[in-house]
Each structure stands twice: as C-alpha cells, then as structure tokens.
Amino acid sequence: MKPIPKALKALNWLTGGLFLVALYLVLFFAPREAVMGDVQRVFYFHVAAGWVGALAFLVAAVAGILLLIRREHRWDGVALASVEIGVVFTFINIVSGSIWARPIWNTWWTWDPRLVTATIMELIYLAYLMLRQGVEDPDRRARFAAVYSILGFLTVPLTFLSIRIFRTIHPVVVGSGDPTATGAFDMSPRMRVAFFFSLLTFTFVYVTLLWHRLRLYRLSEKLDTLKMKLLS
Amino acid sequence: MRGYLRVIRAIVWKDLAAELRSREMMSAMLVFALLVVLIFNFALELDVRTRETVTAGVLWVTFAFAGTLGLNRSIAMEKDRGCLDGLLLAPIDRSALYFGKAMSNLLFMLAVEAIILPLYSVLYNVNLFVPGFLLVVLLGSWGYVAVGTLLASMTVQTRTRDVLLPILLFPVVLPVLVPALKASDAYLQGLEMSAIMPWLNLLIAYDVIFTALAFMGFDYIVEE
C-alpha cells in the first residue's frame, strides 16, 4: 500500500490551520450582530457548508459528464467522493440553518421554499447513493450514477432561483435581497472578512476530504480486484 | 427524419396493441388512481370549501402515483420478455427508441387522466374543463414521462427495481410537478395570467431541459 503522499499531508495541516483561524475569526474577530446577537455567527459556517454542498454536486455532475464523454472510469470515484461530501455538508447546512432559525424565526423548521429545495437536493443525492447500491456491475453503476448526477444537478438552479421566484422569508445576504426578510442584515467589513475566510476554509476542507476519499476509493477497488483474483 | 418518426410510431403502435390485448397496465393505473382519489376524500374531507384549494394538488399527486405504476410496468414488460434486447439489436437510433417509449407512456398517462378528470369533475362538482388547465396537464405529464421513462429504464436494471423508481423519480421531477401544480391551481382559481406565466415558463423550461437530457442520456443507460 502506498503511504499518504506528502502533498496530502501538507494539505491536512494547512486545512487544519485554516480551520482554527476561521474559528477565531467567526467567534471572536467578527463583531456581534446588533439585532440577532451571537446566534448570527452560525451564518458564516452555514453559508460555507451550503457552498461546499453545491460545489460538491457541481463537481459530481462535471465528473459525470466527463465519464460519459471520455469513458474513463476514474471519474466515477471523483463523482462518488464528491456526492458523499456534498450530502454531509448539505446536512450541516440544513441543521445549522435550523439552529439559527429557532431564535430568529421562532421555529426549528418552516416550509419555506428555500429550506424545502435544499432538502430536496439532499434527498436527490441520497437517492443517488441508493441507486449506486442497487447496481452491481461497476461499469454500469458508473454510467447510471453519472446520468443521475447530471439530472439531479439540473434541479439545483431551482434551489437558487426559488429564493427569487417564490415568496420566501429566507434572507439573501450576498447580492441584492429583500431587506424586509426576517433576519436580514448588512455585513460590516469585519464580518465580510470572517465570511469569505469561512468560504475559503470550507473549500479547503472539501478538497482535503475529496482527496482522502479518492484514495479510499482506489484502495477499495484494488481490494476488489485482489479478492476476484484470489477467488478465481 | 421520416425513418426516425416511423420508428417512434412503430414502437408506440406496438405498445398500444399489446395494451389493447392485455389491458393490464391501464386497468391497474386507473383503479389505483381512483383509490388514491378515494383516500384523499377521507384524508382531506373534501368538502366544498377545501375542494377549491386542494383540487390541483389531489389531482397531481394522483397522476404522479399512478404514473410510476405505469412507468414501471411499461419498461419491466420490455425487460422481462427479452423484448428490450431485441429492440436494442434493431438497426435504429437509440433515441428513437426512447421517444417511442416516452410517447406511449405519455399516451397511457393521458388516457388515465382523460378518465380521472371528468370523473373527479362529476364526483366533486368542480369544473375542470378550463383550456389552460388542460394544457398544463399535458405539459406536466410530458415532463413527468420524459424523466420517468429515462429513470425507469435505469431502475429496471437494478437489484431493487420498482422500489427504486419513485425514490429516484420524485425528487428529480419536482421542478416539473411544482410549477404544474401551481399553474393548475392558478387556472382553476381563475387567477390572472400574470400570476400564471412564471410557473408556465418554468414548466416549459424544465420540459425542454429534461427532454434534451433524456435524449442524450438514454444511450448510456441501455448500452451493454
């Protein structure tokens, strides 16, 4: 078995360091929001997790397209790794949003379109994982998963459009939003620093996890071929 | 192009002929759809006031549920009797095969709707013969079978088969179902066009997107 490559080891430490800095920025550096108080600090990691979720699903869809066009099996590993990470981070996004909503909207959950569409996105990719489980032939599994990940990603724009088409109470902090939405606020410069640094950190976390997961995927593939050899 | 259309027609014709002889799919879909409406009747207490607001929802849920039944059946039929392999061996464009299957699925779905709608109309004394609403039913059904046919040809080759189809289909088809539902509701409530247009646009956009994607993706799903 190949040891962990040096670059990945370095990335581990870098990501860990960035995360500590991000924690400091979010918890101490960023000022307390005037109306919502400390609860608002959820926002930084909430958006960052949502961003990683969307990025992960985009990567999965692109990997799917590459797999279908170039017929290279390695893209299947990228797609699977990315979807698994995306599912976890979308879950973090939903749960952290819920924690924020409890004091601000006075409820853990509301059937707001933004929340619902995020949940639908999560369900699509859970279905993706179930689809993979149902197909044994690795080649066919890769093709099916690729088609489904592309199909699933087409519904993601709905998530981001929904905030503008539907009437929603979810605040839009980045870009122009309805300032009357409950919990809307303007970012101060220090908040901006914490916010963009969180985005950057979570992107690094994503890349690190993706790399580790890909290694795991290759190892398990190797294990499968060894098993086949042994049995035949 | 003419040959392409002829292939589609041949497949649709084959499906219709098989269905006319066995009648197993239509009867199953129809009875199931009626049962769903019946359950809604008890679940929602469809009195005069509720009926006005929930009719579109009840109908679309019914169509979606009955639709999965038909989709599963229509593709499983091809697979089980080895018919799919024969079709794949034929020197025809694979996408024509997809459009043929999708067309016949659409026809079955429309046939079920053509019976359920008047029946619902009579049973609950609601006027459903609004041209705009019927157009939305047509567009929504197309979007539904466009994705549904693609996914059903996928799930039929998996271990869990019919269980998997609704799980894969429902979250993905929501961009069609939600605007169809909202537009239907708006038409039935007699809202202005300005309230309907965004939904109608979204519905048409997703119809086109899903059809294009299925057209391109079908090849990869049936290949051996």
Image (tube, coloured by chain):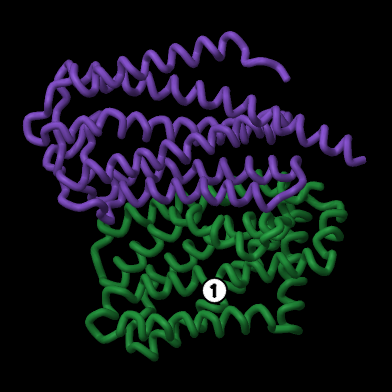
Chain colours: A purple, B green
Dot 1 falls on which chain? B
The residue closer to the viewer here, B14 or B4, is: B14
Q: Residue at x 37, y 32 (%)?
A: A49
Residue A168 shown left or right of residue A204 in the figure: left
> Can residue B190 be seen in this snapshot?
yes
Query: Toward the viewer: B142 or A189?
Result: A189
Secondary structure under tag 1 reads helix
Which residue is rendered at x = 24% and y = 18% of the image?
A25
Under mark 1, the amino acid is Ala
Quadrant of res A103: top left
Residue ID for mark 1: B66
Residue at image position (61%, 74%) is B108
Residue extending farthest right: A232
| Residue B65 in picture, x, y percent from top left | 51, 71
Q: Is residue B176 left or right of residue A39?
A: right
**Residue B200 placement (x, y as % from top left):** 38, 56
- Above or below, A13 against A124 in this view is above
Q: Position of residue A77 (x, y in %)?
A: 65, 32
Q: Quadrant of residue A33?
A: top left
Residue visible at 67% across and 46% down in the picture: A144
In-image side of A110 versus B99 (left or right): left
Q: Position of residue B199 (x, y in %)?
A: 35, 55
